[in-house]
Structure formats: structure tokens, C-alpha cells
Image (tube, rainbow, N blue to C red):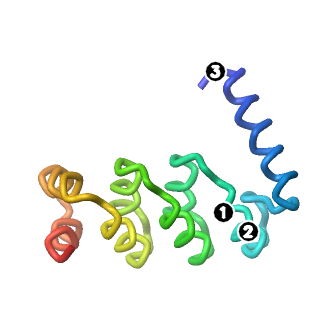
Amino acid sequence: MNKHTGFLVALAATTTMLLSGCASINSADPNERLKAVGHVGNPAKLAALACNDTDARVRMVAVSKLKDQGFLAKVACEARDWEIRKAGFRRLDSGHLTALAGQTKDPAVVLAIRIN
């Protein structure tokens, strides 16, 4: 990402925050983040929130908004919370599940794929 793209992303995030009643995805208040996650459209940001946010509600909303199969696979394999990982697995199509099963060495992931 170049410096102009970064500026545009920051500008878009600021505009979104202002239009969404000042709820910020970067807020220390989990209730504010919960309000703000509904306005996030960037799949990379949603995947990061699903994997890393400290509030389970924010993580679940983030994974439920994801449509991109690559980012859903990332959440299914990397989220620290198994409920979030399961939600990611459930949203993966059969082609991505099959590909993931062939790529992973993690026996827990293979088992989760077989169960799905």
C-alpha cells in the first residue's frame, strides 16, 4: 500500500465513523466496536476483527459479514476462539474446504473440515 492509498483508507474510515454516529472500530469500548463492525466492508479488516478482537460479539459479527472465501479460510484456521473458527468453517464452500484439507497440517483443522 502506498502513502496515497493509506491516506484514502484513513479518510474513508474517518468518514464512515462520522456517518455511523461516531462508533469506532478502534474504540476501547466493546459496545462501540460492536456498533462500528456493522459498517466495516473491507474483508481483510473483517477477518482481522474476527481473529483478534477482544469481544466475542464483535468477532462473531465480523465473521458473519465475511463473504470472501479466502478470508473465511483464514478465520477458520487462525482465529483463537473455536466458536469463531466453526462459524468460518460453516461459511466455506465445499471447494474451499477440500482445498484447505489438502493444504493444512493441523489435525484439528482437518477434523473440523471432516465434521463440516
Amino acid at the residue labelled 1 = Gly
Per the image, label 1 sits on a secondary structure element best described as: loop
Residue 61 on image: x %, y %: 56, 69
Residue assigned mark 2 = 35
Q: Is residue 82 above or below residue 51?
A: below
- Residue 51 location in percent, x, y? 49, 62
Q: Position of residue 22 (x, y in %)?
A: 87, 59
Q: CA distance from mark 1 to mark 3?
A: 27 Å
Helix or strand or loop: what does disc 3 sit on?
Answer: loop
Q: Which residue is mark 1?
A: 38
Q: Nearer the viewer, mark 3 or mark 2?
A: 2
Q: Compared to 66, does 53 lie above or below?
A: below
Residue 20 lies in what quarter of the image? bottom right
Q: CB atoms at circles 1 and 2 under 8 Å apart? A: yes
- Placement of the N terminus among the 4 image quadrants: top right
Q: Which residue carries the number 3 mark?
A: 2
